[in-house]
Image: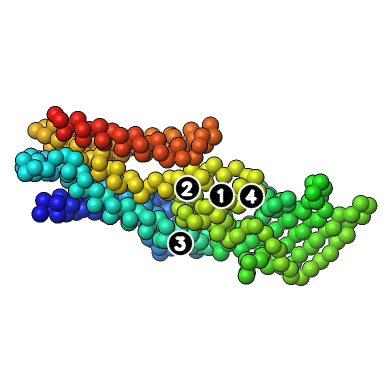
Amino acid sequence: MIDKYLNKEFLINISMILLGLIALFAFFDFMQEINDLGKGSYGLFQALIYIALTIPGRIYEIIPLAVLLGSMLAVGQLSNSSELTIIRSSGYSIKKIAKTLILVGIFFALLSIFIGEFITPTSEKAAQQLKINSKASVVSQEFRSGFWIKDGDNFVNIENVLPDASLEGINIYEFDTNFNLRTISKAKKGQFVDGLWKLEAITQKIIKEKTIETVTIEKGSWKSLMRPEMINALIISPEKMSTINLLKFINYLKKNNQKSTKYEVALWEKIIHPIMPIIMIIFAVPFGFFQERSGGKFFKMFIGIIAGIAYQIFNTMIRHLSLLYDWQPFLSALIPTTIFFLIGIYMIIRFEHR
């Protein structure tokens, strides 16, 4: 009975906090979108749909914070009403309470995996496509000349990437084994069909020893390591991509001897992220036995907010340091998580023997 009661109280409080945070972030997102209203056909209706499509991504991001704040609120309420004292007198140690509540953490961990892997990548891409189409624009470019991609021994310049992952203004520079430029192929459009890129309006310049031969082709096929799911990386941020697509994109970059640290960091964060709800509960439970007669639930809620902000700042700092100093990608995900976990375990042991 006590197990069910504890899990129910934590589940209710975490769910309430999660809904509140979703509403808060949706409001902030709407305020940010106001500046784009009126650009092309991007109006109020499109902005509301865009925000609705980005909500799964927001839920995925804030689940650990919601679990932390909801757990702090729950332990504050239980402590304020002396229920924690009664539960402990019934033979429940702090360790046993934490173990009991891991079930709630597992529930939110599975929810994170489901949303992060199966909903967010699709909804985020749909949101970006809606906004790009409505504003009659293309995906933002890294350089004025467009995107530059290494494809085996060749270099590819793509002027525009459209929301459906089709390409405009494709320039393919083919080199031989001695890195001598042999062919320059230019295509007006390109679309991925049946494992090949179908190009239209192709102009090909074949460079020979003394002459340059120009050939015009109406349609042609281009076999490339690049896939549409890799183009998604140009539309959505690495954190919103699925694990499978991240792995494919990292593999593609490594095959072409390109730096993949940014995407490897995102991959490790996706691996660690589902564990965070469990760690946040372990971190929060000991606070129910901290200053039981002062501050009450609102004091513990305040501690939860400060801890959540500290975690986000520390996590962001470690991620940037990892990219700046080229640390092992797994470190940026493991360091903040491990520190929070160890603090939680330390406090459980300390208050258990107090």
Point out the image quarter for the N terminus.
Answer: bottom left
User: Marks 3 and 2: which is nearer the front?
Assistant: 2
Residue indicated by mark 2? 267
Element at label 4: helix
Answer few, some or many: residues within 10 Å of disc 4's Cα (few below 14, many 20 plus, some between 14 and 19).
few
The three-letter code of the residue at mark 1 reads Ile
Q: Are marks 2 and 1 in contact (CB under 8 Å)?
A: yes
Whole-percent x, y for residue 169 in the image: 69, 59
Whole-percent x, y for residue 235 in the image: 53, 55
Q: Are marks 4 and 3 in contact (CB under 8 Å)?
A: no
Element at label 1: helix
Residue 180's place in the image compared with 197, above or below, is above
Q: CA distance from mark 2 to mark 1?
A: 9 Å
Q: CA distance from mark 4 to mark 3?
A: 26 Å
Residue indicated by mark 3? 122
Residue indicated by mark 4? 255
Which numbered disc flags the more N-terminal residue, 1 or 3? Answer: 3
Q: Are marks 4 and 1 in contact (CB under 8 Å)?
A: no
Which numbered disc flags the more N-terminal residue, 4 or 1? Answer: 1
Residue indicated by mark 1? 250
Which numbered disc flags the more N-terminal residue, 4 or 2? Answer: 4
Element at label 2: helix
Answer few, some or many: residues within 10 Å of disc 1's Cα (few below 14, many 20 plus, some between 14 and 19).
many
The three-letter code of the residue at mark 3 reads Thr
